[in-house]
Image: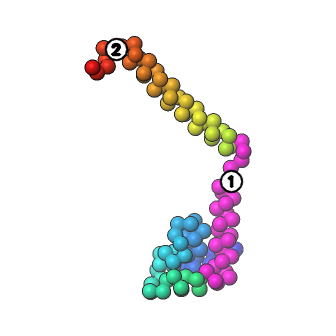
Amino acid sequence: MPILRNSRHEKFAQLLARAKFGPSEAYRQCGYTGKNADVNCQDVLANPSVAARIAELKAGNAQECKMTRKEALAWLVDVWTCICQSVFKGLEALEGLRRAPSLLPM
């Protein structure tokens, strides 16, 4: 689906697809004013072309966020390695203090 012709509708769809704001705040962020933003945003949401554009953008976002099992496992290994290195550095520092008791405060 192409970009919506109404630039406010397009911005509204993009803000909702990115989950940056709820419908009322997204409505205001698009330059709409008025006391009834909570009600008026529902009119924009009910527009079939806006709803389709939001669905399309969300599907694209979900596709970009997919991670394979292999990538997830590699990420977990990296995190675990980093944690272990930090722990071992801390243990080495404690061992150094144990060997040099004169450095410890009394």
Say which quarter of the image contains residue 72.
top right
Residue 88 picture location, percent across and down? 51, 25
Three-letter residue code for mark 1: Lys
Q: Residue furthest front?
A: 106
- What is the image's colouring? rainbow
For marks 2 and 1, give the one nearer the viewer.
2
Judge whether 78 appears above or below 60 on screen.
above
Residue numbers of the magenta segment: 45-70
Say which mark, if any, is on residue 82: none
The residue lying at 58 percent from left, 32 percent from top is: 81
**Label 1: which residue?**
66
Characterize the magenta stretch by its predominant secondary structure. Answer: helix
Magenta-span inclusion, residue 46: yes
Mark seen at residue 101: 2
- Report the residue at 32% width, 19% height from top: 104
Q: Residue 53 in the image: x percent, y percent?
A: 66, 74
Q: Residue at x 66, y 39 (%)?
A: 74
Q: Is residue 6 visible?
A: no
Toward the viewer: 92 or 98? Answer: 98
> Which residue is found at the position 70% from the left and 74% from the top?
1
Q: Quadrant of residue 18?
A: bottom right
